Image (cartoon, grey):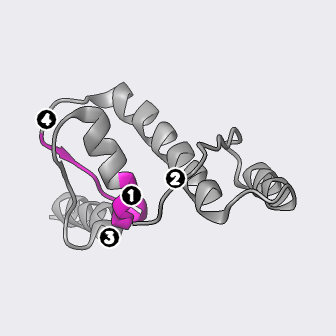
Amino acid sequence: MIAVRRNIQINSMCTVFAQSEVTSLLAKRQKREDIARGIHVAIFNRTLSLLKRVSTAPDIVFAGGVAKNPCIKRLLGDALGSEVKVPEDPQIVGAYGAAIIAQDSSE
């Protein structure tokens, strides 16, 4: 694991503006690993905010492409105080579920 020296905050939810923030941080000679951690924390904060709208009960299943990111999974698990389960292919779970629903509705 890479050691993070500074907690850098990325404020933009929009990827275009976040990219501008990152470019500015690089120009200010901030460490790349600190910037990367800041990006992860920004994604984590957004994910946690959305999750809290639904539930933060134990046995959380994290699906979608971001679920393949071990840092986000660890940040979520630490924040929730429980294990976050990730399916084998989390990036296709939504499409798979939609296909099952479509098949059931056509019968």
Q: Is residue 68 magenta?
A: yes
Is 69 or 103 nearer to us in this picture?
69
Question: In the rendered image, which residue does mark 3 sit on?
Answer: 92
* Sequence-wise first label, 3 or 1: 1
Is 74 or 52 nearer to us in this picture?
74
Q: Residue at x 46, y 65 (%)?
A: 2
Mark 3, Cα crowd under 10 Å, few <14 / some 14-19 / many 20+, is: some
For label 4, the SS is loop
Residue 13 located left or right of residue 68: right
For label 2, the SS is helix
For label 1, the SS is helix
Q: CA distance from mark 4 to mark 3?
A: 23 Å
Question: In the rendered image, which residue does mark 4 sit on?
Answer: 58
| Residue mark closest to the camera, 2 vs 4 | 2
Residue type, label 3? Ile
Q: CA distance from mark 1 to mark 4?
A: 19 Å
The magenta region covers 59-72
Residue 107 located left or right of residue 47: left
Residue type, label 2? His
* Sequence-wise first label, 4 or 3: 4
Q: Residue at x 26, y 29 (%)?
A: 55
Residue 43 located left or right of residue 64: right
Q: Position of residue 94 (x, y in %)?
A: 32, 60
Labelled pair 4, 3 in contact (Cβ < 8 Å): no
Question: In the rendered image, which residue does mark 1 sit on?
Answer: 71
Labelled pair 2, 1 in contact (Cβ < 8 Å): yes
97 to 53, vertically: above or below: below
Question: In the rendered image, which residue does mark 2 sit on?
Answer: 40
